[in-house]
């Protein structure tokens, strides 16, 4: 996705370099032509390091949307686009990586309403299904947000009746937090078990899958 702009960036010093060589300013022309290679490489490194970053999908929690070993590009500047329906990479609450751990005690039949106080160093990848202030419960694996069950989810694998498929007691998503679910609803460790994710723990928004080549797609 960055190839076109980088090629355009290379054309200016390349054209100037060729013109200088034609004018018999060979040394200056060769130096300018070299910039046609160096500048795009430097810009690419800057963009990849600070704007867009690649991540691998480590589990089947996002099946069928994303499979184990898929590689995705994450826009680290796109936090303004964070919202319901977006797939995001984030740091989960401490304890999430080791199993189910909610930040507060809560009754059976209710999703975890609060995360632990600190973020983990691990990165997870899930879909946002509810935002700050929304009331949320779970019915047959579908989020019920502000009393409305979202059944139009063609991208999910059905929950299948395992634990976490039905959590009828609603919670309210805390201010500045987002509730996440994996698309593989019966095989995902997500906000149902360790709570909503604070916005400042979100790394970025998934914008594309670039590997495998047969499954390239944009989100």
Image (tube, rainbow, N blue to C red):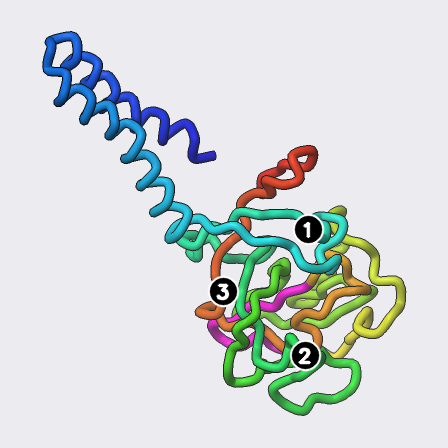
x, y (%) of residue 67?
A: 72, 50
Q: Residue drawn 62% across and 38% down? A: 217
Reading the chain from its start, which is encountered first: label 3 or label 1?
1
Q: Position of residue 188 (x, y in %)?
A: 74, 65
Q: CA distance from mark 3 to mark 2?
A: 19 Å
How many other residues sit within 10 Å of disc 1, few (<14), some (14-19) or many (≥20)? Answer: some
Question: Is the C-beta separation of discs 3 and 1 under 8 Å?
Answer: no
Image point (80%, 54%), residue name: 157
Residue picked out by circle 3: 202
User: To which residue does mark 1 refer?
Assistant: 69
Magenta part of the protein: which range? 170-181
- Disc number at residue 80? none
Q: Nearer the viewer, mark 3 or mark 1?
A: 1
Nearer the observer, 19 or 123: 19
For label 2, the residue is 98
Name which residue lies at 30% across and 26% down: 10
């Amino acid at each position: 996705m960055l190839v076109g702009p980088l090629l355009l960036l290379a054309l200016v010093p390349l054209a100037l370099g060729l013109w200088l060589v034609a004018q018999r300013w060979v040394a200056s022309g060769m130096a300018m032509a070299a910039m046609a290679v160096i500048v795009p490489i430097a810009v690419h490194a800057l963009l990849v390091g600070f704007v867009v970053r690649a991540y691998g999908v480590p589990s089947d929690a996002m099946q069928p949307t994303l499979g184990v070993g898929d590689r995705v590009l994450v826009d680290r500047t796109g936090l303004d686009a964070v919202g319901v329906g977006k797939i995001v990479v984030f740091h989960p609450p401490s304890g999430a990586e080791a199993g189910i751990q909610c930040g507060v005690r809560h009754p059976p039949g209710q999703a975890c309403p609060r995360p632990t106080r600190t973020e983990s160093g691990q990165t997870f990848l899930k879909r946002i299904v509810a935002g700050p202030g929304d009331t949320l419960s779970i019915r047959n694996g579908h989020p019920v947000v502000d009393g409305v069950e979202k059944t139009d989810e063609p991208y999910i694998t059905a929950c299948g009746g395992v634990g976490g498929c039905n959590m009828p007691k609603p919670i309210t998503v805390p201010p500045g937090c987002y509730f996440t679910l994996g698309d593989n609803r019966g095989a995902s460790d997500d906000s149902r078990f360790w709570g909503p994710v604070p916005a400042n723990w979100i790394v970025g928004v998934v914008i594309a899958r670039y590997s495998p080549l047969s499954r390239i797609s944009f989100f």
